[in-house]
Amino acid sequence: MAARHFLTLNDMTTTELESLVDHASKLRDEWHQGKVRDTLKNRVLAMIFEKSSTRTRVSFEAGMAQLGGSALFLSPRDTQLGRGEPIEDSAIVISSMVDAVMIRTFAHDTVERFAAASRAPVINALTDDFHPCQLLADMQTYREHRGSIRGATVAWIGDGNNMCHSYVNAAAQFDFHLNVACPEGYEPDAGLLKAHGDRVTVFRDPAEAARKANLLVTDVWASMGQEEEQKIREQAFRSYQISPALMQVADKDALFMHCLPAHRGEEISADMMEHPSSVVWHEAENRLHAQKALLEFLILNQLD
């Protein structure tokens, strides 16, 4: 049977995604109860990092250990990938030795090419275009605090980047409406907007996007690889900050999320992480549990 891959949220059905999120919450509860789980005993995850990471590495490596398996950290400096070996050749060899492969890289084409040649499941742990693993954690977090997100309004404040793109896909898969507030020239991908025009509305005014929203989300103004644009982006995004004042125009029970790392004083006010609406730390931990559920689904082909 061909391997299932997870390159975007669209690689799963809505039913599969919702079952996965529910399973992640079960795994979270079991972990906090101290229950031992060894469903992935003797299984190995290869972790390919071309972009640096804190949460992604810790969550996948710890997740495999908590399920009884192990993880290998591979960087371009230490492998032939960094010396020009074709992606397809690396995929054939690596996937013949491990049970799944996680890739965090720049071009989305890299994970697509790797997956096409891989006999093992491939997980997109972030590309310049999408970040689906973070959305699993976000959807799990919302469900644990507020129940189903179906029919809700989510406000994305900031750059139309890879996180925003995955929120567009999530709007369709989890059945909510997405308001995107961004400066002109920083909109999400035009093709994605066209494909999901019934799910996404673009605003210039953050307050308009946030009005009556059930969830406010943001990300840094300059992502990895955009450091040279920092000053330009600071000017463009200076009014696109989530703060207690912006939360005031949202629904009274609205939540605030951020995928981290956060730049206090830029995309969020200095006090936003400690705001009563903030579930950022819960969201961050859920990367661990959502990815454990994902690993079980892809490697074992089950959610139990």
Image (cartoon, grey):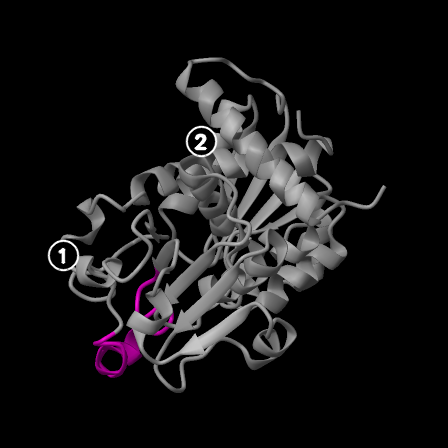
Magenta region includes residue 228? yes
Neighbours of disc 2 within 10 Å: few (<14), some (14-19), many (20+) = some
Q: Are marks 1 and 2 in contact (CB under 8 Å)?
A: no
Neighbours of disc 1 within 10 Å: few (<14), some (14-19), many (20+) = some
Magenta region includes residue 283? no
Q: Residue at x 57, y 26 (%)?
A: 69
Q: Residue at x 44, y 68 (%)?
A: 179
Q: Secondary structure at mark 1?
A: loop
Q: Is residue 121 visible?
A: no
Which quadrant of the figure has residue 283? top left
* Residue 193 pos. (x, y %): 57, 76
Q: Residue at x 68, y 42 (%)?
A: 16
For the C terminus, the quadrant is: top right
On residue 62, which mark appears?
2
Q: Residue flagged by tag 1: what amino acid is it? A: Ala
What's the magenta region?
218-239
Q: Is residue 299 visible?
A: yes
Where is 157 relative to 60, above or below?
A: below
Where is 143 relative to 86, above or below?
A: above
Q: Is residue 26 left or right of residue 8?
A: left
Q: Secondary structure at mark 2?
A: helix
The residue to which callout 1 is attached is 270
Q: Residue at x 31, y 72 (%)?
A: 206
State the residue lying farthest toward the right.
1
